[in-house]
Amino acid sequence: MRKKIERFLYARGFHVPEVRKMALHQVYFLCGALPAVAFGRGGVDLVTGVLLGTLNFLALGKLIQELVYLQKSAVIVQIFSFYGRLLLTALAFYVLIVHMGSSGVWLLLGFSTVLINILLWGMSQFLGKTSKEA
């Protein structure tokens, strides 16, 4: 399953191994959250939050990869796409909470898997350093 997801991510433009690894972990969070749907409305809200977080994380990962690693031009277009996605996410949260009656707490708990993914990656980078500085 990991190889299929990695091939899918690579085909979608995730060519930098570290970025692809983080994107893979976020997809794992999404797959791991799917059984929560069986627990009713709260579970559906949790999975919806994870889905929104995963979509944003994948888009942001691709954007950062292009800006930092691949150094493509058209930064203005990428910045507008970032803010456009931010606006769409806020609109999705608004519609889900106000009009659909979703729980904001469960949505944010699901969305916070992005932060957990980033923190775990940072801790692995910090703990993975074996060289000592003088």
Image (cartoon, rainbow, N blue to C red):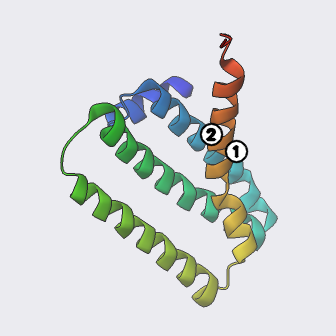
Where is mark 2, residue-wise?
A: 28
Say which amino acid is labelled 2: Tyr
Q: Residues within 10 Å of mark 1 (few under 14, many from 20)?
A: few
Residue at figure coordinates x 54%, y 83% from the top left:
95
Where disc 1 sits, the SS reads helix
Query: Image quadrant of residue 101?
Result: bottom right
Residue at figure coordinates x 28%, y 55% from the top left:
78
Where is mark 1, residue-wise?
A: 32
Say which quadrant the N terminus sits in: top right
Residue at figure coordinates x 75%, y 72% from the top left:
105
Q: Residue furthest bottom?
A: 99
Find the distance from the CA under tag 1 to the CA under tag 2.
6 Å
Whether tag 1 and tag 2 are in contact, CB under 8 A, the answer is: yes
Q: Nearer the viewer, residue 63 or 42?
A: 63
Query: Image quadrant of residue 46?
Result: bottom right
Residue at figure coordinates x 47%, y 33% from the top left:
19
Say which quadrant the C terminus sits in: top right
Measuring from the top left, give residue 43's x and y in whole percent.
75, 64
| Up/down of 82 relative to 90, above or below | above
Left or right of 102? Residue 20 is: left
Q: Nearer the viewer, residue 25 or 69?
A: 69
Measuring from the top left, give residue 132's x and y in whole percent.
68, 11
Q: Residue furthest front?
A: 134
Measuring from the top left, give residue 131's x and y in whole percent.
65, 10
